[in-house]
Image: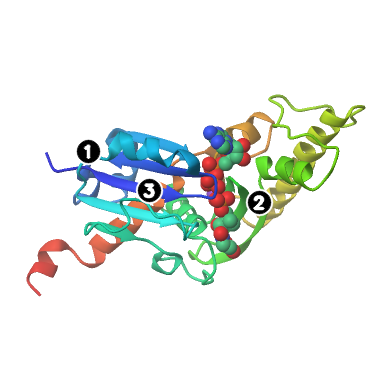
Amino acid sequence: MNSPILLIAIGNTRIKAMICAQELFEDCPDRSFNHSLNHQIIATHAYPHAQIDQLIERIQDQSFSLITIASVVPNLQTPWHDLPQTQIITTADVPLDGLYSSMGSDRALAAFGAGEFYGYPILVIDAGTAITLTAIDPHKKLMGGAIMAGLRSQFAMLHSNTAALPMLTAPDSLPHRWAINTNTAMQTGIVHILLMGLQAYIDDWRSQFPESKVIMTGGDADQFQKWGLAIDIVDPNLIFRGMISFHRSCLLRFPPDRAAHQ
Ligand SMILES: Nc1ncnc2c1ncn2[C@@H]1O[C@H](COP(=O)(O)OP(=O)(O)O)[C@@H](O)[C@H]1O
Ligand SMILES: CC(C)(COP(=O)(O)O)[C@@H](O)C(=O)NCCC(=O)O
Ligand SMILES: [K+]
């Protein structure tokens, strides 16, 4: 068996890694390579930056035929960055139209992965350190998006910018909107206002593209779905789907046997 492939996505909170079988990139006539992702995943890992040593320990002895890294944290280097089989994907590499140069590669890849897998037009909401919305129209062109502080970041901001407010986490169930104590007031304010704002964006998008799917990814995606945000699907693997679709589009443009004869 060929050595597996390592995909690494570095966000502002966590480093995520997926190890999958090489067969993922073998020739197939349609998008079925991406549909088969679930059968090809060997392992997934996610560690906060401070615990990168644990990730290194878990996979340092394995050899990979191909390593792909996408990062929105330029100063975080990993032992895999400088290997000969490593490719760093940037926003400029992602084959969608209208992407701007300072756009995060995580957003570009998640949107590309979502569009290639679920179809265009597509709205992607990534609930990570920041919450981002990225909307791609039926012609694979960026319609636009938005960035706001993520769930944990909102609590951290209130705590660090005030004298009296504690550091809290988000509540499991939806809090009552009108609170009569500090902790619930913070939780209800953050959760309800985030939900209402995101829902307004989703409604606006659906009014333009009623047939479009709305996909959520990122560390807090399940929580937003539990609170009732009207999304279609939670998919934690969008960015990895984007990397796989990227490699696939390269293979279709430059098939290995043709390249060998050039
Ligand atoms: N072990 C964890 N450490 C930190 N945040 C976590 C953890 N598990 C889930 N989360 C949640 O995930 C969010 C960060 O999502 P993630 O997708 O990892 O972000 P990023 O892509 O920015 O690194 C935080 O808002 C937090 O609520
Ligand atoms: C908006 C982000 C900070 C989100 O990062 P994350 O929360 O996933 O760690 C990242 O995509 C980024 O640095 N973007 C650059 C600005 C832009 O996308 O317009
Ligand atoms: K993210």
Tell me what residue is drawn at x 49 percent, y 66 percent.
139
- Whether residue 220 is visible to the viewer of this picture, yes or no, is no
Q: Pointer 3: residues within 10 angstroms few (<14), some, or many (20+)?
A: many
Measure how far apart labels 3 and 1 are at the Cα level.
16 Å
Q: Residue furthest bottom?
A: 262
Measure how far apart labels 3 and 2 are at the Cα level.
32 Å
Identify the residue position indicated by label 3 in the image. 8
Residue 4: x %, y % from top left:
22, 42
- Ligand 1's quadrant is top right
Q: Quadrant of residue 194?
A: top right
Identify the residue position indicated by label 2 in the image. 206
Identify the secondary structure beneath mark 2: helix
Number of the label disc, if any, that sits on residue 61:
1
Q: Residue furthest left?
A: 261
**Colour basis:** rainbow
Tell me what residue is drawn at x 45 percent, y 38 percent.
51
Left or right: where does residue 120 sit relative to residue 19? right
Task: Tell me the mark number nearer the camera, choosing from 3 and 2.
Answer: 3
In the image, what residue type sits under mark 2?
A: Arg
Q: Residue furthest right?
A: 180
Left or right: where does residue 28 sit relative to residue 89? left
